[in-house]
Image (cartoon, rainbow, N blue to C red):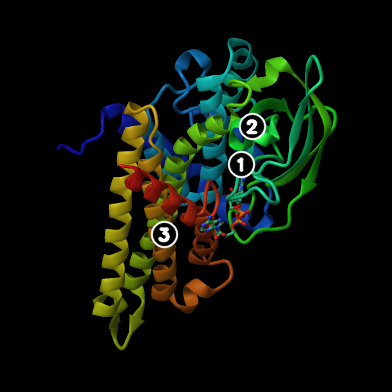
């Protein structure tokens, strides 16, 4: 086994890292402070291929593989967790399922725009009573002869504040449960859609999360994404990639926390010497570095599986579970190493500590990842 990256993968990682250092690092604290969606970053992200990483070049994407995507997202997240999620939603949850399941007309309407940053996508699956139990969709789409009429409320729709198009999941045959859900590609300016501001959140502030209310919204049959009744399969396919992306995002946040802890440990003096000389500190750093690298291996393995297999649910869930929990521990240990300097409101570690927490919740909680992993190993 040789663990090496291609020149293309490394070059793409460098592009993302340079962008993160030059454009995200100076802005990350103020995005968190204001909670404002960073619209101005969409054009440069798109120009670098970071909003359509795996979308074929013919459709305006960067035509890269998932390994390159994971490397790039970790690099973005090292400087801004929230920008990495914004990109991952557009890539994994919108552009990729559109490229995979979309008709030519749907692709012509949206794919190039999404991949280049001229349009932004969102993904509306969750509802008040359909989070972990995502198949419990109360949003209904009723056939009216020419298309469907959608009514219901979606919650926590990331990117919604700036999005142009949203993939909406709705029950078309509620008695069939997850086999009766259909995905629709819906422009956000369609009459009948009202946006509602979400309550403020602990971290990843600036993600543009809104609730979306659909009041008898008419969509044409041509707006069905994938086959009618196959919406849940579309969501699951998209979430395979999305979870690899969140694993990479978590690693970026965890690595940033480790970097802060190492820098602080080298310079902070207690009892006449740098605290990095104390074994108590060294062991924290060693455990965090080992944890992150183990999770990184799973993330790269999952990304490679996404590139080579039809489905990679097991690998993606293992990567997301390991990376989000390792990154959480990394932020926690970094807080311990920095102590009051980290606990101070406005410190970088304080932001990382808040940002990392969501990685164990969105795109399936850690409990969901464990359920998927257990189901896979028990079935085998
Ligand atoms: C910042 C942020 C951004 C988000 N962005 C989006 C988005 O863009 N699009 C979207 O559709 N959704 C989005 N979500 C919603 C997210 O996917 C859900 O919050 C998540 O799936 C969990 O659902 P819930 O919050 O309703 O928790 P619940 O489903 O109420 O779960 C509560 C607790 O019970 C546990 N639990 C539930 N069922 C079981 C079980 N069977 N066995 C064991 N434990 C169980 C859960 O793991 C959790 O710990 C976002 C959420 C956040 C916080």
Tell which circle, 2 or 1, labels the residue nearer the N-terminal end.
1
Badge nearest the viewer, 3 or 2: 2
Residue 159 located left or right of residue 377: right
Element assignment for label 1: loop
Density class for disc 2 (Cα within 10 Å; few <14, some 14-19, many ≥20) is many
The picture places residue 342, in percent across and down from the top left corner, at 48, 72
Q: Can residue 120 be seen in this snapshot? A: no
Which quadrant: the C terminus?
A: top left
Tell which circle, 1 or 3, labels the residue nearer the N-terminal end.
1
103 or 47, nearer to the observer: 103
Element assignment for label 3: helix
Which quadrant: the N terminus?
A: top left
Badge nearest the viewer, 1 or 3: 1
Residue 333 located left or right of residue 82: left
235 or 91, nearer to the observer: 235
- Residue 147 lies in quadrant: top right
How far apart are the two marked residues, 2 and 1, measured between alpha carbons? 8 Å
The picture places residue 324, in percent across and down from the top left corner, at 43, 55
Density class for disc 3 (Cα within 10 Å; few <14, some 14-19, many ≥20) is many
Q: Tell me the number on the disc at residue 325.
A: 3
Density class for disc 1 (Cα within 10 Å; few <14, some 14-19, many ≥20) is many
User: Which residue is at 56% across, 52% downward?
Assistant: 28
User: Which residue is at 28% across, 79% downward?
Assistant: 280
Q: Which residue carries the number 2 mark?
A: 181
How far apart are the two marked residues, 3 and 2, measured between alpha carbons? 31 Å
Element assignment for label 2: strand
User: Which residue is at 41% across, 61% downward?
Assistant: 257
Q: Which residue carries the number 1 mark?
A: 135
């Amino acid at each position: 086994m040789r663990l090496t990256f291609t020149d293309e993968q490394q070059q793409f990682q460098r592009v993302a890292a340079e962008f993160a250092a030059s454009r995200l690092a100076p802005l990350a604290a103020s995005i968190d402070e204001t909670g404002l969606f960073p619209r101005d970053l969409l054009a440069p992200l798109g120009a670098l291929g970071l909003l359509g990483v795996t979308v074929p070049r013919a459709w305006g994407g960067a035509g890269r593989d998932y390994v390159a995507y994971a490397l790039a997202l970790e690099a973005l997240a090292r400087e801004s967790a929230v920008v990495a999620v914004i990109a991952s939603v557009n890539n994994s949850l919108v552009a990729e399922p559109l490229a995979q399941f979309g008709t030519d007309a749907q692709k012509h309407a949206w794919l190039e725009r999404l991949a280049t940053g001229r349009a932004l996508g969102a993904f509306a699956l969750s509802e008040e009573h359909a989070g972990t139990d995502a198949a419990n969709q109360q949003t209904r789409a009723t056939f009216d002869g020419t298309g469907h009429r959608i009514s219901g409320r979606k919650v926590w729709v990331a990117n919604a504040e700036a999005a142009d198009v949203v993939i909406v999941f709705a029950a078309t045959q509620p008695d069939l449960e997850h086999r009766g859900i259909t995905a629709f590609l819906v422009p956000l300016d369609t009459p009948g859609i009202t946006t509602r501001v979400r309550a403020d959140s602990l971290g990843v502030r600036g993600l543009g999360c809104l609730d979306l209310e659909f009041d008898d919204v008419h969509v044409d049959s041509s707006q069905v994404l994938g086959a009618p009744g196959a919406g849940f399969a579309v969501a699951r396919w998209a979430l395979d990639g999305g979870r690899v992306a969140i694993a990479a995002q978590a690693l970026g946040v965890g690595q940033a926390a480790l970097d802060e802890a190492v820098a602080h440990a080298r310079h902070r003096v207690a009892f006449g010497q740098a605290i990095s000389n104390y074994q108590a500190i060294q062991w924290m750093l060693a455990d965090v570095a080992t944890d992150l690298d183990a999770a990184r291996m799973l993330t790269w393995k999952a990304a490679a599986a996404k590139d080579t297999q039809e489905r990679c649910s097991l690998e993606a869930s293992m990567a997301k579970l390991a990376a989000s929990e390792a990154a959480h521990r990394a932020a926690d240990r970094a807080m311990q190493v920095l102590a009051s300097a980290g606990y101070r409101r406005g410190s970088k570690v304080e932001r990382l500590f808040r940002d990392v927490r969501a990685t164990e919740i969105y795109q399936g909680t850690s409990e969901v990842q464990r359920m998927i992993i257990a189901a896979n190993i028990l079935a085998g």
